[in-house]
Amino acid sequence: METEKTVSILQTKEFSTMRKKAAALLLALVLCIGAAGTLPAAAAGSSSVSSTTSSRSGTPIQLTDEHLKLTVPTGLYAFTQNTDPSDPSLAKAGITNWIRQKQDMQQQNEILLICAPNSAYTIYLRKKDTSSTQKYYNMKDMSGTAVQSLMSELNKPESSVNGSDSIKSSSKRVTGAAGLPYVYVEMNGTLDNKKVQEAAYLTIANGRSYTLGTYREIGALTAPQHASLKALADSLQVTQYLPKQQESGGSAFSALFLAGPLLFLAALVAVLYIVGRVSRTHEKRRKAVMLERITDYRRRQEEKEAAARERGIPLAGPEVLVENTTKCVKKALQRFSRVDLLLNRKGTWIFLLIAAALCLFIATKDSSTLVRIFAILGAVFCVIYILRIPHKVFQAEDGTYRKMKTRKVRYQFRAEDFRVTGVSSGVYPYVQIAKVYETSRYFYLYLGANHVCLVNKHDFTKGTADDLRAILQKQCSNFKPHRKHRNK
């Protein structure tokens, strides 16, 4: 049985931290004035905490959710995280900052805090629920070897790096008056040249570890402090021992069964990420080459204009080889939005379809209703997202043309560039074209992510679709012709 696991079960992590990092331990374990937000034992207001009438021996308190009960000695005040901040017992116990104390209590997993008047000393009850505590479940069933290993670990003395602080601990196995087994731990030493001492009773019940402890920063623990801690440990009882739940083989098989698709999806995401990084790198290089070619194109045009000025004659415009006037009606834009999804956004819709298929697979194989609902919602989201892409593209393109007086766009294709008259009028060199797709009815020239030229094959006023295809194949290395013309 591993010692480290046993230590974590009994919540002795705080003690180990004290040896290794003295200053941090002081903050973690000192329960001074108002160390946690609480609820008075004499007026327990939580649904999970109940108390009966006080007697000379103390006030009985039952922690229903924890299946525990104990008796708080007379003269002490007990609080939980559900304490009413207006309770007068808080002031009697010396607790003034309720918000801060409740936060500290939550951070320390404290379910109960017992305070002497004016916070002369405090005693905490902490719990912890981990896979290790579930494994051992009850200290009364733990082997002697496990407990001995724990005590050997706790008894090792340690010092700080600079040697000024030193903490020693001792431990022994004890049994409370109510029959509950404990490991009793005492820690003594110096921190910042101050004598400190801490004592705690540690036990495990119903798969949770519980720690009853107290601390004093300057000097040794007082006799009343020792007596109160022992009285609480003697009175602590487990009201009900719950049967240990066996792990479901079906659930383990289901987890393994679902791991395959989830791992595949994770691998797919990783591949897409890598492909995306490579694509972005390639795109940066392509833009750099494009910028260089555009610069070279403009330099040649400037040289031609300078030569014409020297001769004193106007620069003749380049010959128009192919001319086309396309009317970009809504039907044409809707057709383009579908083509844009299928040809220009393949990675997006393929990934979403695979994700939707995996979600449906999980929905049919998992027995959990909640998992099925989320899986079905994931599949529906993926499909709706795919269907929304063409609609968004259409809305963006149609919005541009609605602002224009006419939807007609005139294209004049020349040897090195082409002129656009209408939407986004200007002269564009062929090297500025990022992508070109050809379908049975249109040429789609992508000048950027948000600028596409639609050229209808049936609206040529000069030349033909074959002439334009020849120009694009010569000038654009990324031209994707229609399947009928790929082998020509």
Image (cartoon, helix red, strand yellow):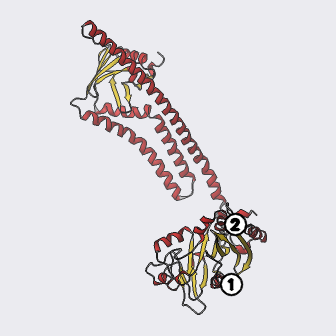
Q: Is residue 338 above or below residue 123?
A: above
For the residue marked with disc 2, what is the amino acid? Val
Taking the image as shown, residue 407 lies to the left or right of residue 236, namely: left
Q: How many marks?
A: 2
Q: Provide the secondary structure element on which disc 1 rests.
A: loop
Residue 60, percent across and down?
58, 86
Q: Is residue 319 visible?
A: no
Note whether 234 is above or below 132 in the view shown.
below
Q: CA distance from mark 1 to mark 2?
A: 24 Å
User: Is 470 or 1 nearer to us in this picture?
Assistant: 1
> Residue at the spot x=34%, y=26% of the render?
453
Residue most extreme to the right: 145
Camera-nearest residue between 32 and 235: 32
Residue on which the image places disc 2: 7
Q: Is residue 359 above or below residue 112?
A: above
Q: Nearer the viewer, mark 1 or mark 2?
A: 2
Look at label 1 and name its amino acid.
Answer: Ala
Lateral position of residue 372 relative to residue 308, left or right: right
On the image, the x and y values in percent for residue 156 come to 74, 67
The picture places residue 44, in percent across and down from the top left corner, at 51, 82
- With 148 as the anchor, is 311 left or right in this view? left
Instruction: Check disc 2 and report its element: helix, strand or loop.
Output: helix
Which one is earlier in the sequence, the residue at label 1 or at label 2? 2
* Nearest to the observer: residue 129 or residue 211: 211
Q: Residue at x 62, y 54 (%)?
A: 255
Location of the N terminus by quadrant is: bottom right
* Residue at left offset 39%, top offset 21%: 294
Residue at numbered disc 1: 178
Residue projecting furthest to the left: 405
Q: Residue furthest top?
A: 311
The residue carrying pointer 2 sits among few (fewer than 14), some (14 to 19) or many (20 or more) residues within 10 Å by Cα, namely many
